[in-house]
Amino acid sequence: MRKPFFTAAAALILSALLAAPSHAACTEEEANQKAFALMQAMQELSQKDPEKYEKLRKEFDQEMRQLEAQGKGDDMQAICAFAGKALQRIK
């Protein structure tokens, strides 16, 4: 059974980006774009390369948990950086 493409990490990224203060350097628009791009990329990857998808899904979930444990779960800069790096790793 295939896991849904909307991973826990993507859900956390989206909620954190939308809840972060708007005065941060990563704007709300950029945050929305990154969250959407990450969800799309994960969906495409789940179809194209299920093994890589599953590996990255687990890694991204763990990395988001680490950000939260460090108190950065709502830090827009940390979340934006994570989303950008995650997108690069998918490609």
Image: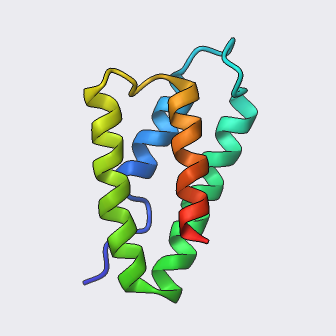
Q: Can you tell which quarter of the image residue 87 is in?
A: bottom right
Percent of width and height locating residue 19: 52, 23
| Viewer-proximal residue among 44 and 80 | 80
Q: Can you tell which quarter of the image residue 39 is in?
A: bottom right
Total number of numbered discs in the rendering: 0
| Viewer-proximal residue among 25 and 41 | 25
Residue in view at x 52 percent, y 55 percent: 86
Residue in view at x 71 percent, y 21 percent: 25
Residue in view at x 36 percent, y 64 percent: 57
Quarter holding the N terminus is bottom left
Quarter holding the C terminus is bottom right
Image vertical order of residue 26 relative to residue 46, above or below? above
Image vertical order of residue 43 relative to residue 30, above or below? below
Percent of width and height locating residue 80: 59, 37
Percent of width and height locating residue 73: 39, 28
Residue in view at x 54 percent, y 64 percent: 89
Colouring mode (rainbow / by chain / secondary structure / one colour): rainbow
Percent of width and height locating residue 15: 47, 34
